Image (cartoon, rainbow, N blue to C red):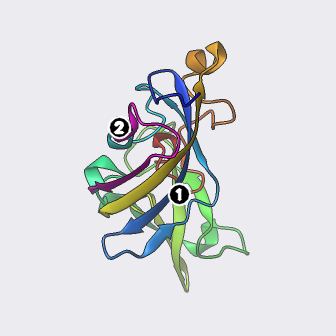
Amino acid sequence: MNVQVHKNTVVTLDYNVTDLEGELLDAGQESLVYLHGGYDDIFPNIEEALHEKRVGDTVTLKLQPDNAFGEYDASLVQVEPRASFPLGIEVGMQFEGAPDGTEDDDFILYRVTEITGDTVVLDGNHPLAGMALIFTCTITAVRPASTEEIARGHARGAEDDDDDDDGNAPARHCH
């Protein structure tokens, strides 16, 4: 039976993300699995395009920054003293911290983008912030969600938080 994508179904997608020039930004090496039906488990535009589709259907969407990882926010870039970091610090490492002027519990993930002499540049923006993206996906599986998945608001095995762990997958919990 070829189940349609509807509210409270778990959808598995093979996907890739490119920029507008076709440069591959995320090869989607692992399938994206999400709970369909307004659970904020994937960008709303993608969810809307997949509604009532079936296994084997392919969808291609152009996502503007406000419908994907947001606009680039220069206030999320911070320059910190090199002495505040461990000796082995390298570009690409990630640290959790609170943006300047916010409550201590408003932590976000910062990436080290530059190390020069006695300073370290940290960027709290998602790596794809400010970019228009082309998201292409093919539905590889659709199944009814379990009662537990519906109660949790995401598919079994999906992350239990909203942190940006890998920086690429177009699920909401990744931005």
Circle 2: element type: helix
Q: Nearer the viewer, mark 1 or mark 2?
A: 2
Indicate whether 118 appears above or below 61.
below
- Visible residue check, residue 137: yes
What's drawn in magenta, residue-wise? Answer: 47-64
How far from the left and from the top, in percent, is residue 56? 51, 46
Residue contact at pointers 1 and 2, CB within 8 angstroms = no
Number of other residues with Cα within 10 Å of mark 2, as a class: few under 14, some 14 to 19, many 20 or more: some
Which residue is disc 1 drawn over? 167
- Visible residue check, residue 130: no
Where residue 44 is drawn, which disc sits there? Answer: 2
- Asked if the magenta segment contains residue 57, the reply would be yes
Give the left or right position of residue 120, taking residue 18 as reference.
Answer: right
How far from the left and from the top, in percent, is residue 106? 47, 39
- Asked if the magenta segment contains residue 69, the reply would be no
- Amino acid tagged 1: Gly
How far from the left and from the top, in percent, is residue 17? 44, 62
